[in-house]
Amino acid sequence: MNSKQAKQILVDNLWFNNPIFIQILGICSTLAVTNLLSNTVIMTLGVTFATAFSSWTVSLLKNLIPRRVRMIVQVLIMSFYVIILDILLKAYLPEISKSLGPYVGLIITNCILMGRAEGFAQGNPPAAAFWDGLTSGLGYMWVLLTVAFFREFLGFGTLMGYPVAPKGFVPWTIMVMAPSAFFMVGTLLWISKNIMAAREKAKGGKA
Amino acid sequence: MTPNIAPLTLFFASIFTSNILLANFLGMCSFISISKDLKSANGLGLAVTVVLTLTNAVNWVVLRYVLIPLDLLYLRFIVFIIVIAAVVQMLEMIIDRVSPPLYMALGIFLPLITVNCAILGAALFMEIRKYDFVQSVVFGLGSGLGWWLAIISLAAIRKKVDKAPVPAGLKGPGITLITIGFMAMAFIGFSGMLPVQ
Amino acid sequence: MNRDSVFYTIIFTFIVTFAFVLPLTLAEQGTSEMVAKNTENARRKAVLTAMDIPFTGDAEAASLFQGVTAREKDGEVLYTYDKGGKTVAAKEFFGMGLWGTINGILAVNGDVTSTVGLQIIGHNETPGLGGRIDDASFKNQFRGEALKDGKLKIRSGAEAGGGPVDPGDGVVDGITGATRTTQAMEVIVNREIGDIKKLLGASR
C-alpha cells in the first residue's frame, strides 16, 4: 500500500464511505452511547482498536480460512480482541472498565467490525487492512463525537461532565433518550449529503 | 432467581411492549438498510426470527450445562456469538439453495445477521435475567417476531415516504432515521407495561 | 492441502479456536487475583462511604474496615459499625434494574428509622439516565433520610425531580427520564431495609 492509496482509504472512511452515514453500520452503539461524551470516547477508542486489529488478523489468515467457517472464524477473531481489552481494563484500569463493561457486547456485534472484515480485509494485504480498520474507526469516532457533543450539551447542559450551559438553561431531556440520536444522525446525514452534492455540482460545473 | 413470568406474557411483552428494536434499540443496522424493500424486509425478518429462536435455545443449554458448571462465564461472549455464527452460516447455505434472489437481495446483511446486536443482546438478556429454557425460547421467538413486525412496519411506511417530496439530502437513510425516531418515541409509551424480568 | 476439505475445516477450526481462547483463558486467570482485589477494595470503600465514614486512599479504607463487623447468616452478610456509641448497619444488595443487576450498599441506623447512605458498586443502566443513580446528587439524598413506616418513597415519573427537600418526610427524588430504573431502586431499597431489620433482629 503506497501513500496515495493510504490517503484514499483515509478520505473514504472518514467521509465518502463513512461507516455511519453512508454505509449505515454501527448504529446500535451510536444510540446507546452518545448521550455522554466520556462514554463515547471510550467506546469509539475500543471500536477503533478492535476493528484495526481484527481486520489485520483476518487479512493475515485469509488464505488459510476454509470457506465454510469463514464467519465463525471472523467472529472469533473480533471477540478475542474485544474481550482481551475488557479483561486487561478490568485488571489495570477498573474505573474505565466500569464505563466500558456494558458495551463489550455492543462492540463485538458492531457491524463495522464485520463489515470491514468481509468488505476489505478478505481481499487486501494485512497492512492495508489494519489501516482501513483504523480509519473506519476514526470515521465512526468523529460522527459519534459530534452527535454526543450536541446530545450531552442539550440534554444535560454539560460537556465531558463539566457544566457549560448558561444558568437558567432547561435541559432537553429528549436529547438523552434514544430517539434524539436518530434525529441527530439523520440531520448529520442530510448536511453531509448536501455538502457532497454541492461539491459534485461545483466539480461538474468546472468541467 | 428465575423470574416468575408466564411464557405467554413474556411472549407478548417481547413482541410489543419491550420490542427489542424499538424499546432496546438493538438490531438497527440491517433494519435501516433492508427496510427499503418489503420483500427483502420480510425475508430478513423471517431469517432473524429463526436465528433468534434457535440460538436462544442452544445458548441456554450451553450456558446451563457447560459455562456455569465449568466456571467459564467469562467466555460467554465468545461462545454465544460462535453459536450464532454457526447457525447463520447454515442458514446462509440454505437460503442460497432455496431462494437465490433473496440471497442476492440480502447481500452483505445476511452475514451481518451474525453481528446483529439483537441476537447477542437477546442471549445476554436471557443470561442476566436468568430465564429458564421455556422462557428463553419464548423470549427469542417473541423478540424475533417483534423485530420482524418492526421492519415490516418501517418498510410499509417507507413505501409511502419515498413517494413524498423529501429533500434530496434526506432521501433514503436520512428520512428513514427520522421516521424510526418517531416510531421509537411512540414505543417509549409502552415501556414497562408488561413485566419481562 | 485443500482448504475446503472437511478434514482441513475441522482441524483449522480446532486450532484457531484453541489459539484464540488460550490467551483469553491465560489473561483471565492471570488477572483474576488482581480483579478480585479490585472488587474487594471497591466493596470496602462502598461500605465505608455508605456508612458515612470518611477515609483517604485505599490503605486507610482497608485499616478502617477492620473496625467493621461482618456477620453472616443464610448467605447474607450484615456489616455493623459502632460510630461513637451509635450502631450503623449496612448490607450489600443485588437487585434487578432495567437492563441488568444493580449492585450496591445500603446503610441504615441501628434502629432502622432512617437511612445513613447509599452507594452503588455496579450497574448496567442507561448512561446519563438510569446511570445517574451513581450521581452524588441522587445518593446524597440517602444521608439521614427518615423512614416512614419503615419505608422510603422515591418519586418517579412526572414529579421525579425538584420536589420539596425534607429529610424527615421519607420521600426522595427519583431521576427524570429514568422512571423504570427509579422504580427498580425503590423496590430494591425497601426490600433491603426489610432484610437489614430481619438480620439485625436475628443477631440480637
Image (tube, rainbow, N blue to C red):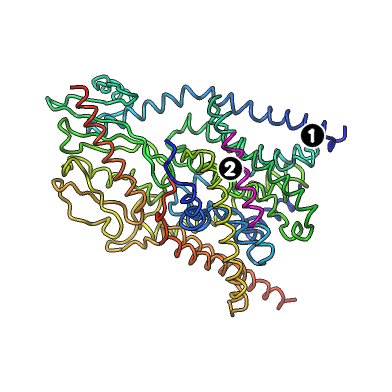
For mark 1, give the secondary structure: helix
Residue neighbourhood size for the residue with mark 1, other residues' Cα within 10 Å, grouped as few (<14), some (14–19), many (≥20): many
Residue at the disc numbered 2: B56
Image quadrant where one finds the C terminus of chain B: top left
| Residue C158 vs residue A188, the one in the foreground | C158
Q: Is residue B120 above or below residue B36?
A: above
| Residue B24 vs residue A140, the one in the foreground | B24
Query: Residue A76 placed where, x, y %?
Result: 66, 37
Residue with the most extreme bottom position: B165
Task: Determine the chain carrying the residue at label 1.
Answer: C
For mark 2, give the secondary structure: helix
Question: From the viewer's perspective, is A105 left or right of C197?
Answer: right
Query: Residue A133 placed where, x, y %?
Result: 66, 47
**A68 inside magenta stretch:** no
Question: From the viewer's perspective, is B17 left or right of A81?
Answer: left
Task: Determine the chain carrying the residue at label 2.
Answer: B
Q: Amino acid at mark 1?
A: Thr
Residue at the disc numbered 1: C9
For image coordinates 29% across by 44% down, the residue present is C136
Q: Amino acid at mark 2?
A: Asn
Q: Which residues are magenta?
A: B45-61
For image coordinates 56% across by 24% down, the residue present is B70
| Residue C63 vs residue C26, the one in the foreground | C26
Query: Residue A107 placed where, x, y %?
Result: 56, 45
Mark 1 or 2, closer to the camera: 2
Q: Is residue C91 above or below residue C124?
A: above
The secondary structure that most of the magenta stretch takes on is helix
Instruction: Place residue C4 in its image quadrant.
Output: top right
